[in-house]
Image (spheres, rainbow, N blue to C red):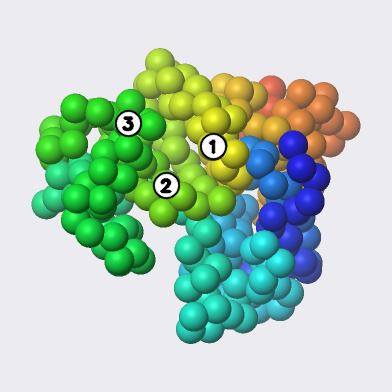
Amino acid sequence: MAEDPIIRVEQLRAAYGERVVLEDLSLEVRRGEIFVIVGESGCGKSTLLNHMIGLLRPARGRVLIRGEDIGAAEGSARRRILRHLGVMYQSGALFGSLDLLDNVRLPLEEWTDLPDDAIDLVAGIKLGLVGLTGFERHMPAELSGGMVKRAAIARAMALDPEILFLDEPSAGLDPVTCADLDQRILRLARDLGITFVVVTHELPSIFTISDRLVMLDRNARGVIASGRPAELRDHPDRAVRGFFRREPSDAEAAAPA
């Protein structure tokens, strides 16, 4: 795995008006790795993700994608950066009025000049990569939650992105389906060389897929720990260790039953 960072977050300040969510946050994502972001609800995971994909602009600092500042880029320069990114949102965000093939076709129709038959071919290949060959003409409402998530990943891969962002990919799925999705993510990372940035709460997924991770903290407004999951499970900070061992905080432990 190459060590050069494909994403660099430098002294990021993220705020909604006067409310500061992240302060002076810096991190690097290496090319080809599966990088996981964890932390309690409200700690800024989605805020960080939305800055990394360019939906939000930093109050201070910058986010570099392949060396280019996504927050400052405009026009064609911004489109050039976005062309290298794919995003799967927590709900899947498929269009319910379109079948799977047409959902995956959408980025290709918007960003390329390929003829219709070529777009169909590429969209079918992407669905095949996530195990959905034969379901091209199914509507999202006809599928299980896990299949919807896989279809959303296929759409996120439509333009062959170098970086794929997954927001809570396992949310709402049963353990068996979660495990299947984890293995598909590992295969895609290995076979296609995609860099993954994943936000998740699911411990089995964290230990299965992550090469490295960062843990955010609401009070610290930033990263309180980073490394491999096994390292953080034995971290000296009790809050970090408790998250990875699913131990209650002091306040929870002291609360009456």
Q: Dividing the image into 4 quarters, which one contains the C terminus?
A: top right
Q: Is residue 56 above or below residue 98?
A: below
Q: Nearer the viewer, residue 237 or 82?
A: 82
CA neighbours of label 1 inside 10 A, class few (<14), some (14 to 19), many (20+): few
| Residue at screen point 51% across, 33% down | 188
| Residue at screen point 48% across, 73% down | 79
Residue at image mark 1: 192
Q: Earlier in the sequence, mark 1 or mark 3?
A: 3
> What distance separates the C-alpha of mark 2 from that of mark 3?
12 Å
Residue at image mark 2: 157
Q: Does dot 3 land on a helix, a strand or a loop?
A: helix
Residue at image mark 3: 128
Left or right: residue 3 versus residue 138 is: right
- Amino acid type, mark 1: Leu
Tag 2 and tag 1, C-beta contact below 8 Å: yes
| Residue at screen point 69% across, 57% down | 7
Q: Give the image location of residue 201, x and y in percent.
A: 55, 36
Q: Give the image location of residue 178, x and y in percent.
A: 43, 24
